[in-house]
Image: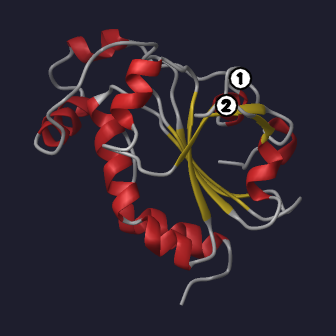
Amino acid sequence: MSLPPLSLISEATLKTKEGQEIKARELWAQQPCFLYCIRRPGCVLCRDEAQKLWREQQALTDAGLKVACIVHEWIDREINAFVPEYWAGDIYHDADKAFYKAFGQGELRTASSLALLNPLNPAWGRILAARKNVKDINVNGEASILGGLLVVKAGEGGIAWMHEEKTFGEFPDTQDVIAAAKEALGAAQ
């Protein structure tokens, strides 16, 4: 997997929860940044991953990373249920889906919900495990756009690491994510 060029995301216009618009490059202008690009705030898998990552955000912060979450659609009710219950940090709306396109080297990547009709689909195991940790879920919003995780170096340093979601809820172990982020920035102990 080759890392996408920073140019795919740096000029993206992001909107804060308060409605302020910023350019994405402002997130990593002064320090490296860890970004969780979620598929859907009401999704059981997304909420489970968010709370796992947020519980470990101090390790990322200690490694010198700013930590933020990106969503591709903004439904107030969904964001208000997601923040701060599952993610207590900064959250930004990427209306143009630039971050999501970056995972596909400029093309938006999607998955079909029809795959969930197969009871042997590995996503079902992840869903059942996530349901133990997340009680409040819904199916509001666009669920087919795949997300992932990014570590961006400070300034114009580029994308240091990424994990692209290939199927619903497919993320590496949280400790592996932290280790990969630290290693990508040369901060591994």
Badges 2 and 1: C-beta atoms under 8 Å apart?
Answer: yes
Q: Position of residue 41 (x, y in %)?
A: 40, 29
Residue under label 1: 107
Within 10 angstroms of label 1, few (less than 14), some, or many (20 or more) residues?
few
Q: Is residue 44 in view from this perspective?
A: yes
As drawn, 20 above or below 59: above
Residue 74 placement, left or right of 114: right
Q: Position of residue 16 (x, y in %)?
A: 64, 36
Inter-mark Cα distance, 2 to 1: 5 Å
Q: Amino acid at mark 1?
A: Glu
Dot 1: what SS?
Answer: loop
Measuring from the top left, give residue 117's x and y in whole percent. Answer: 22, 11
Q: Along the horizontal axis of the image, is 10 left or right of 62?
A: right
Above or below, comparing residue 175 to residue 136 in the picture: below
Q: Residue furthest front?
A: 18
Q: Is residue 177 above or below residue 96?
A: below
Could one spot residue 105 in this view of the protein? no
Q: Nearer the viewer, residue 93 or 179?
A: 93
Inspect the image, locate mark 2, and give the three-letter code of the amino acid beneath it.
Gly
User: Which one is in front, 76 or 36?
Assistant: 76
Residue 183: mark: none
Residue named by callout 2: 104
- In the depicted view, which residue is nearer to us: 43 or 92? 92
Which colour scheme appears in the figure?
secondary structure
Q: Residues within 10 Å of mark 2 (few under 14, many from 20)?
A: some
Regarding mark 2 in the picture, which secondary structure is present there?
loop
Which residue lies at the image location 34% right of the left edge and 62% below the top edge? 55
Image point (40%, 30%), residue name? 80
Q: Residue at x 30, y 14 (%)?
A: 139
